[in-house]
Amino acid sequence: MVQGFVHVIESPSPQDLLDGRTEGRALGEALKLAEIPQCYSLATDARTLTTALGERLQAAVRHYKSTPILHFSAHGNSNGIGLTGGQFICWSDLEEMLRPIHRFFDNGLLVCMSSCESSSAMQMAMVDEPDHAFWALVSHMGRPSWSDAAVGFIAFYHRFFKGHGIEAAVQAMQDATGDTNFAMWEGARIKANWLARMQQRIDTAIAQPASPQGQGLGALSGIGRVDRIGGVSGGALGRASLRPSPDVQQPGTTSGDSTPSPLGNSS
């Protein structure tokens, strides 16, 4: 069995709350039934999100005495996730919140994102810093339906907490939903690929001769954006503060078993 627990952090829209549609809470109940350690936080704004990742997470770690898996359930798009109160958390803001948690747990933080275009959260590993925000990211490359998101993550945790590798657990998500857009990315690999690509762009720009049209080193102005890594569109990586939410979308292959989990297995 995996030594860990799932910390579900949910931020539904006001309409979701009115309709009683809370995917994260439903997931928490399924985890209880499966006897998987879990806790739940409803984060409606930036303050309560900070509390969920701070005081409440610390209390859960003291209670379970193990490493958390952070599961986010919210509406989102390629730039980040929206909160109930209308604030928008871009990936760079969330990366700054998660980085010290990842570091505290010896670079072994597993992050699961249940939102539209959640694979874009891999941007949190594309940082020119000594470390980043996660060991692995489990997310979706499109707009999963409510039912597929709920069933998929239940299948993932059920398999993962039985001691199967993360690739096998993601395969279980795909099998349970028939949706191969559920996938996993390793933070260290994403970061290495991104840094190599940035260095390649710099080298190419330096090698270009200067011209009256401003070519050559002027080409460096474009390296703040990522085009495509791993087949998923990136985006601007500049720092951005909390800001009013843009339109966020509502929820609409890996194989093998080779990536070891930092969470470890009990004997």
Image: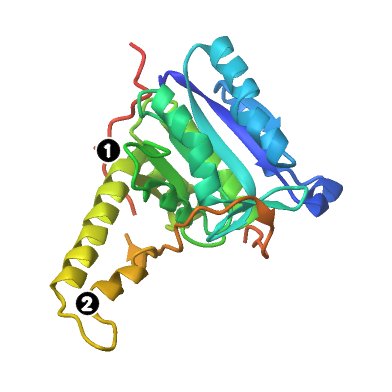
Q: Nearer the viewer, residue 204 or 74?
A: 204
Q: Quadrant of the N terminus?
A: top left
Residue at image point 86% right, 49% down: 18
Say how the picture is coloured: rainbow
Q: Earlier in the sequence, mark 1 or mark 2?
A: 2
Locate residue 208: give its quadrant: bottom left
Q: Nearer the viewer, residue 82 or 230?
A: 82
What number of labels is visible? 2
Q: Residue furthest right?
A: 18
Residue 166 percent coordinates (x, y): 36, 37
Q: Quadrant of the C terminus?
A: top left
**Which amino acid type corresponds to the residue marked 2 in the rendered image?**
Gly
**Which residue is disc 1 drawn over?**
257
Q: Is residue 207 above or below residue 136?
A: below
Q: Are marks 1 and 2 in contact (CB under 8 Å)?
A: no
Report whether residue 152 is seen.
Answer: no
Residue at image point 24% right, 72% down: 217
**Mark 2 nearby-residue class (10 Å; few <14, some 14–19, many ≥20):** some
Residue 127 percent coordinates (x, y): 37, 48
